[in-house]
C-alpha cells in the first residue's frame, strides 16, 4: 500500500533521515521503533507532506506522493495522529471529531457513533472543550478524530507518550481493533515492547537509518533489540 | 440625567463612531487571531474603499455603487493578502510586518497619485445622509443606523464562526496551522476568508464613516485605522467581542471628551488608554491567556 524508497530528509539543518526504505502492506500494522531522534517522526511528517524530503520515493497506492503538499496528500486517504496528540483545545470534543471529517460531505452520524462506541468516555464528554480532557482522553480523541476521515492509512506518532501504563494498554487494544476493521496502520513508538506486540512487521531505526527489520515476534526475540529497547 | 441630556448629541455620535471603529477593528483582530499579524494595510483598505465610492458614484447610481464598492474592497483585501503576505507564510514574523507596512504605504501613495492629494467630497447617499432631529439635537440618519447595523453584522459573524464549517476551520487554524492541515483544511482558503470578511466589514464601515465625515483624503484611513487598532488591543487582540466592546468604549469616550470641551485631547485620550491597558493588562479585556502559538 505504501512504499518508501531511499528516503533522505534534512530537518533542522542536519540529515535526519539518511536513505530509508520500507513497505507497509495493505491491512497490516507496521511499526518503526527506535530512540528519540532516530528520525521516526521526520518520516511520518514526510509522508504527510509536512516536511519536504531531499530525495527518495514515497508511493501510496501506486502513486508518487513525494513532493505533494499536505493539502493534496490527506484527501488520498492518509491521516496522521500527531505527536503530542494536538487536539484542538478550544473546540468541543464533538467539534474535534467533526473537524476530523472536514473533507467529507456525507452524513457523519454513523462515524461519530462508531467513535463513541470505541471510546465511551468521549461520548460522556461530548460538549466539553478538548483542552479540559486528560492525557489519555485526548489521545482517544486524537485517534477518533483521525478515524473520522475514514483513512486508508492511519499513521500514529508516539501514541503512548506520557500516558499511564493501563491507558497505554487500552490504546493499543484499540489500535488492534481499528486494524481488524480494515485500516492499515503505521505506528511509531519508543515503547518498543507494546509496539512489537501488535505489529505484523517492525523496523528498528538508529540515527536516520533502518538497522533491523522483521516480524514483530522475531524482533522481540532479537538479542540486540532486547538489549537496546526492551530492557531485558 | 442632566449630563445625559446635555451631552446626548455627543453620546449618539460616540455610539455611532464606535460602531464604525468596531467594523474596522474586527478586521484587525481576526487577521491577528489567525496570522498573528497586525495588518497595517487595513486602514488603507478602508480609505481606498472611501475613494472607490467617490469615483464610482460619479458614474453609477448609489444603489449599484455601494455593492460594487463592497465587492471591490473585498477584492483589494484578498489581493493584498495574496501578494504581500502569502509568499511570506513561513518567513519570520518581522518580514511579514515590514511587508504590511510597505503595502500600506503603497496603497496610500497610489491614492495620493490618483487624487493629487486633494480631499474629495463623499457622495450623499439617500436616507442615511438625511438629517433627523431627536430631542433638541440634529443628527444624520447614519448616526442612528450605525450601531444597529454594526450589532447585526457582528451577530451574523459570531454565528458564522461558532456554527458553520468554515467558522470551525477558522477557529482551528487560529490555534494550530499544522494540525489543521492534517485535517485536510486548506489554510490559504481560510486565511483568504478572514481577509474577505475583514475587508467586507471595513467597506461597510467606510460607507457609514464617510457619510458622516463627508470628505476622503489619502490619509483618511490612518486615524480611524489606528483608533480601531487601539480598540482591538484594548478588547484583547484576537477576540471579536473584545474588539467591538473596545471600539464602542473608545468612540463614546472620545465624544464625551469633545462634549466637555476638550476636543484637542480626544485623540490623546485614546492613545493614553492604549498605554494604560498595555501596562496594566497587556492581553486586553478578553485577551487570550497564552500569547504565542504552541
Image (cartoon, rainbow, N blue to C red):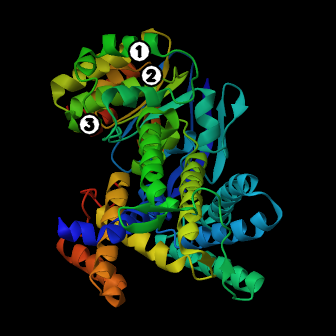
Rounded to the nearest angstrom, the CA distance separating label 3 from label 2 is 35 Å
- On-image quarter of the C terminus of chain B: bottom left
The label shown at residue A38 is none
Q: Position of residue A208 (x, y in %)?
A: 47, 49
Q: Position of residue B178 (x, y in %)?
A: 47, 47
Q: Position of residue B152 (x, y in %)?
A: 45, 45
Mark 2 or 1, nearer chain start: 2
Other residues around mark 3 within 10 Å, as few (<14) / some (14–19) / many (≥20)? few
Pointer 3: what residue?
A: A227
Name the residue nearer the viewer: A51 or A227.
Answer: A51
Mark 3 or 2, nearer chain start: 2
Pointer 2: what residue?
A: A147
Pointer 1: what residue?
A: A178
Rounded to the nearest angstrom, the CA distance separating label 2 from label 1 is 9 Å
x 53%, y 23%: residue: A151
SS at badge 3 = helix
Left or right of A154 on screen, residue A132: left
- On-image quarter of the N terminus of chain B: bottom left
* Chain identity of mark 2: A
Q: Nearer the viewer, mark 2 or mark 1?
A: 2
Q: Disc 2, disc 1: CB below 8 Å?
A: yes
Residue farthest toward the right in the current orientation of the protein:
B59
* Chain identity of mark 3: A
SS at badge 2 = helix
Mark 1 or 3, nearer chain start: 1
Q: Position of residue B9 (x, y in %)?
A: 36, 69
Rounded to the nearest angstrom, the CA distance separating label 1 from label 3 is 31 Å
Residue B114, picture quadrant: bottom right
Q: Please check whether the numbered discs 1 and 3 fall on a single chain.
A: yes
Left or right of B119 on screen, residue B98: left
Amino acid at each position: 500500500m505504501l512504499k518508501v524508497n531511499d528516503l533522505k530528509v534534512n530537518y533542522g539543518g542536519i540529515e535526519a533521515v539518511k536513505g530509508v526504505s520500507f513497505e507497509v502492506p495493505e491491512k497490516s500494522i507496521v511499526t518503526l521503533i527506535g530512540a528519540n531522534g532516530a528520525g521516526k517522526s521526520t518520516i511520518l511528517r514526510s509522508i504527510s507532506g509536512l516536511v519536504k524530503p531531499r530525495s527518495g520515493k514515497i508511493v501510496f497506492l501506486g502513486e508518487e506522493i513525494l513532493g505533494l503538499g499536505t493539502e493534496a496528500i490527506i484527501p488520498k486517504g492518509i491521516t496522521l495522529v500527531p505527536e503530542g496528540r494536538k487536539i484542538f483545545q478550544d473546540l468541543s470534543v464533538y467539534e474535534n471529531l467533526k473537524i476530523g471529517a472536514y473533507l467529507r460531505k456525507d452524513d457523519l452520524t454513523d462515524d461519530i457513533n462508531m467513535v463513541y462506541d470505541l471510546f465511551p468516555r468521549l461520548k460522556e464528554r461530548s460538549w466539553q472543550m478538548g483542552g479540559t480532557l486528560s492525557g489519555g482522553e485526548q489521545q482517544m480523541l486524537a485517534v477518533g478524530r483521525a478515524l473520522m476521515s475514514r483513512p486508508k492509512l492511519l499513521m500514529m506518532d508516539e501514541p503512548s507518550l506520557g500516558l499511564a501504563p493501563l491507558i497505554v494498554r487500552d490504546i493499543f487494544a484499540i489500535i488492534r481493533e481499528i486494524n481488524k476493521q480494515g485500516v492499515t496502520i503505521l505506528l511509531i513508538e519508543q515503547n518498543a515492547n507494546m509496539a512489537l506486540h501488535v505489529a505484523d512487521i517492525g523496523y528498528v531505526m538508529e540515527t536516520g537509518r533502518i538497522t533491523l527489520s522483521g516480524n514483530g515476534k522475531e524482533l522481540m526475540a532479537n538479542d540486540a533489540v532486547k538489549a537496546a529497547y526492551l530492557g531485558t | 440625567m442632566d449630563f445625559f441630556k446635555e451631552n446626548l448629541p455627543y453620546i449618539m455620535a460616540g455610539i455611532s463612531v464606535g460602531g464604525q471603529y468596531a467594523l474596522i477593528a474586527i478586521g484587525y483582530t481576526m487577521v491577528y487571531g489567525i496570522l498573528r499579524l497586525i495588518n497595517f494595510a487595513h486602514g488603507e483598505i478602508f480609505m481606498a474603499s472611501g475613494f472607490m465610492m467617490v469615483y464610482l458614484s460619479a458614474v453609477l447610481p448609489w444603489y449599484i455603487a455601494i455593492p460594487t464598492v463592497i465587492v471591490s474592497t473585498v477584492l483589494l483585501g484578498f489581493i493584498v493578502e495574496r501578494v504581500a503576505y502569502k509568499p511570506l507564510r513561513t518567513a519570520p514574523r518581522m518580514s511579514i510586518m515590514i511587508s504590511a507596512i510597505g503595502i500600506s504605504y503603497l496603497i496610500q501613495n497610489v491614492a495620493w497619485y490618483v487624487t493629487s492629494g486633494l480631499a474629495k467630497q463623499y457622495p450623499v447617499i439617500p436616507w442615511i445622509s438625511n438629517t433627523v432631529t431627536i430631542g433638541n439635537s440634529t443628527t444624520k440618519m447614519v448616526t442612528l443606523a450605525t450601531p444597529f447595523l454594526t450589532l447585526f453584522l457582528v451577530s451574523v459573524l459570531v454565528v458564522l464562526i461558532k456554527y458553520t464549517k468554515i467558522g470551525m476551520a477558522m477557529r482551528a487554524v487560529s490555534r494550530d496551522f499544522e494540525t489543521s492541515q492534517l485535517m485536510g483544511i486548506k489554510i490559504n482558503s481560510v486565511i483568504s476568508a478572514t481577509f474577505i470578511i475583514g475587508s467586507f466589514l471595513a467597506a461597510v464601515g467606510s460607507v457609514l464613516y464617510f457619510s458622516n465625515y463627508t470628505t476622503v483624503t489619502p490619509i483618511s484611513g490612518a486615524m480611524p485605522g489606528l483608533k480601531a487598532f487601539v480598540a482591538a488591543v484594548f478588547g484583547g487582540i484576537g477576540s471579536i467581542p473584545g474588539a467591538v466592546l473596545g471600539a464602542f468604549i473608545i468612540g463614546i469616550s472620545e465624544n464625551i471628551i469633545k462634549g466637555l470641551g476638550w476636543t484637542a485631547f480626544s485623540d490623546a485620550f485614546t492613545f493614553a488608554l492604549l498605554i494604560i491597558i498595555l501596562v496594566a493588562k497587556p492581553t486586553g479585556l478578553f485577551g487570550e491567556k497564552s500569547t504565542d502559538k504552541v
